[in-house]
Every structure is written in structure tokens, then in C-alpha cells.
Amino acid sequence: MEWTDYAHAKKDELASQTLTNYFNAYERLRSLIGGKRNVANIPQKEIIEIIECSAFHKPTILNIAVVFKQFKNKPISKLLVYRDTLVSTAKAEQPKKNSQQIIHANTTYDQLINALRDANGTDYLLFYILINYGVRNADLIITHILSKDKKAKLNKTDNFLILSRTSVRYLRNDYKTAAKYGPQEHIITDKKFINILKNVISSETENVFVNTMNKPIPAGDMSKFIKSRFNKYIPKSNLTQSTIYKIILQHREQLGDLKAMRDIANTRGHTPATQEAEYSTIDYNE
């Protein structure tokens, strides 16, 4: 089977989550193709026609076609030209798409700040990190430790909140662009944050954000968790880490606060150019 051959060859090269994502996209593409033909053997022109008529996210399934043709050393030049066309179209439409996502979130910047002010317990920790650092879901899988225990418990692969007497060190080793930007460290001196974390550390859990079974919430469930926690303070809101980032960015753009825009790009772990292209509601190419 085509997929089995690829997965076996790449199992030591690609992360398990990447392989899972590839498999899901591969299955979508195969459902569009029909029959038992291998993706690698289908002519480029036919693949483009199939994808163009698809309701699936076109760049994702096109990427899989490119991956499998490369795996079998088949030509991909026409697919790459089509990909450039999709990228150009997406860039032109992204600001409008971001605006619609903010509207769909049913939340203003002021409501985010009010939710943070009103929040208690781990809700406050969650909101504080999302609003101040613009992080993604995986960044929120965090272990808490006391500063005196860091020598025994600290490692270079996980995320930590390290509590000392007057501050908290938020150390991120596991986030989307860590391979490019390396570990990120943020010092938190907010008194409410510190006091809440003290109570969390005194509990029986090792992770900051857990479910009702005191098990850490995995990245795949974090979007649902974020939405449910904010809904307690902002009824009928529809928030994800991505829309929270876009709301904050829009506010800072409206203020013309370039430094704050750069700061949140840095803490998210991408360039200002990526911020403009993928998250802004302003078309900087006009």
C-alpha cells in the first residue's frame, strides 16, 4: 500500500503528529481520487483538476500530492506552479478571512481584558498566558515546579512554570517553531498569577491545565478547553488561540503600537512578516 510504504520509510524522520496529519490529508485526497490508484502515479494535470473542484483545504491536499510524487521521484513542476497560485490567492484573501474570524469569535479586545480581570484559578493563568504571549495550543501543556526543584525536574523538551518567591519563569521548549527559535523564557511578576500558581502547586497535579480526571489536556483538546473556559466569562464567545492572537494584534495595529506588535510576534515564535501575512486584518500589499 502506498501509504504504508511512505510511513515506514519516514517513521524515524517525521514526528508522529506530522505523520498523523499527513495521513488525514492523504485519506482526503484518496477519497477525491476514488479507486485504487496510487497518488504518485496520477498525472499532475489530473491532480490539479481534482483539487480545484474540492471543498477540502486545497494547499493541504496539494502538499500531500507533492510529497508522494517526490517520494517516488515523479515530476512535480506543474503542482508547484499551482501551489504558487494558491498561495497568491490565499495572501490576497487572508486579511478579509481574519476579519471574519474575529467577528465569528464574538469577542472584543476589551472583553478579553475584562475576562482576564474577572478570572480566578487556572482560568486566570490560561487567559494571562494567551493574552500576553499569543501562544499556540501545545505551548499550554505546562508542568509546574518550584524553583528549588528545577535541578531535579527541569528538562529541555517540556514547558514549565517555575515558581520562585517573587516571580514565575515561563519556560517553553515545546512549541511549533522551537526548532528555529529555540527555548523561550518569560518572567512573570503579576502577583495574582503568582498566588494562584502557589495554590496549583499545592494540589496533587503536576500539570497546570488538567481535565476532570486530573490528566493533562493534550494539544488536540486544547481548543475546546480554551473555548469552554472563556465562555464562562464571555457568553457565546467562540475563541481559539488563533483568534485571540488576531484580536490582540488588531487592537495593537489600531493603536499603531509597532513595538507591541513586534513583541507578540516574538513571543508567538514567528516573524513580523508572518504576522502581517497570516494574522492581520490589514492588507499590507494594497
Image: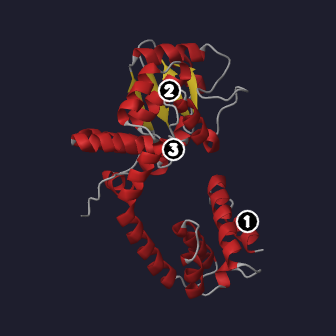
Determine which quarter of the picture holds residue 141. Answer: top right
Label 1: element kind: helix
Horizontal relation, residue 22 to residue 283: left or right: right
Label 2: element kind: loop
Q: Residue 265: percent from the left, percent from the top?
A: 35, 45
* Circle 1 or circle 3, nearest the eye: 3
Q: Residue 42: percent from the left, percent from the top?
A: 65, 85
Q: Is residue 81 above or below residue 183?
A: below
Is mark 2 in CB contact (under 8 Å) with mark 1? no
The disc, 2 or 1, on the residue closer to the chain's N-terminal end is 1
Question: Which residue position is annotated with label 3?
Answer: 175
Residue 233 got which mark? 2
**Given the image, on which type of amino acid does mark 3 rest?**
Tyr
* Tally of marks: 3
Check disc 3: other Cα within 10 Å, few if <14, some if 14-19, many if 20+.
many
Label 3: element kind: loop
Question: Which residue position is annotated with label 1?
Answer: 8
Res 105 visible: yes
Q: Is residue 108 above or below residue 14?
A: above
The disc, 2 or 3, on the residue closer to the chain's N-terminal end is 3
Check disc 1: other Cα within 10 Å, few if <14, some if 14-19, many if 20+.
few
